[in-house]
Amino acid sequence: MTIDIYNTNSISCPATDFCMVTTLQGTAASWDGTSWTDPKRFDTDQNGTYGAACASATFCAAVNAVGQAYLWDGKAWGAAIPVDAAAQAAVDDVNAGKGYDSLHLWIDCPVEGMCMMVDSAGSAFALRDGSWSAAMPIGLPVGSKPLALSCASATFCVVGGNGSGAVATWDGTTWTIQPDAPNVSNLDCASATFCMAAPNYWYVYDGSQWLFSGFDVVSPPQLNDVDCPTQTFCVGVGPGGYVSLYHG
């Protein structure tokens, strides 16, 4: 099976008969269980799309490099919604020769109507009741930057960053730092009492603490992404096609 779309950078499949794929250039195509739609551009200014997340076939959100969000209603993508002014300012500085780095952004939508967006400057933005919140400081340690985001529900998200203790959990209202957390470059949460972080090894969050849970199969150890559909099964992928499995 192939799809006539290039430079893909994200895929989200909330059901067996629906997936959404996005590209860096701001185009997207969806899967209905049988076939893919033709790619259509939703980011008309081609600002650089970082990815999308879908809670269902009728609710997805995408984010681009200038901090704009786009919402999918099952039929079409909506217009750009300015959310993260700092991301726009960083891109403006780069374009004006005043800066070198734009911000990276992540997004996750665990349920219809709710999404969390996080930028690499350490700010978070929540979509609830049709509106995006103002910037919420996550509060990671000085020198740490977010590297991963996962939300298991509307009241539970985790941000992982570089450095010891650079992990924060969201309870629907506030962010709380986890001081004993490992360095986290990628993670996935199946519930509020189960998250898997896999920077180099398996670390499990049980709702109160992070526990070392074993080595992966990659040598030297390194995992680039992890997905946990349940609390007892996770898959991690590393360079060179290496795959590591976790059975709780």
Image (cartoon, helix red, strand yellow):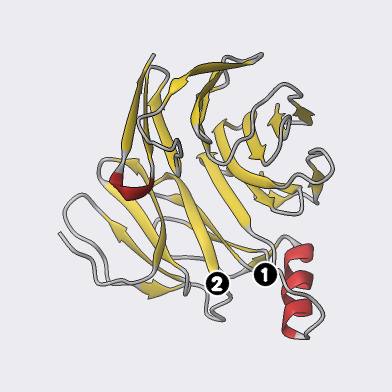
Residue lying farthest to the bottom in this orientation: 96
Q: Amino acid at mark 2?
A: Gly
Residue 187, percent across and down? 52, 35
The answer to whether residue 115 of the structure is visible from this angle is: no
Label 2's element?
A: loop
Q: Is residue 205 above or below residue 60?
A: above
- Identify the mark at residue 3; answer none if there is no mark: none
Q: Residues within 10 Å of mark 1 (few under 14, many from 20)?
A: many
- Name the one closer to the observer, 149 or 43: 149
User: In which quadrant will I find the C terminus?
Assistant: top left
Residue 113, percent across and down? 57, 44
For image coordinates 69% across by 53% down, the residue present is: 119
Identify the residue under disc 1. Answer: 66
The answer to whether residue 239 of the structure is visible from this angle is: yes
For image coordinates 15% across by 59% down, the residue present is: 1
Q: Is residue 70 above or below residue 92?
A: above
- Identify the mark at residue 48; answer none if there is no mark: 2
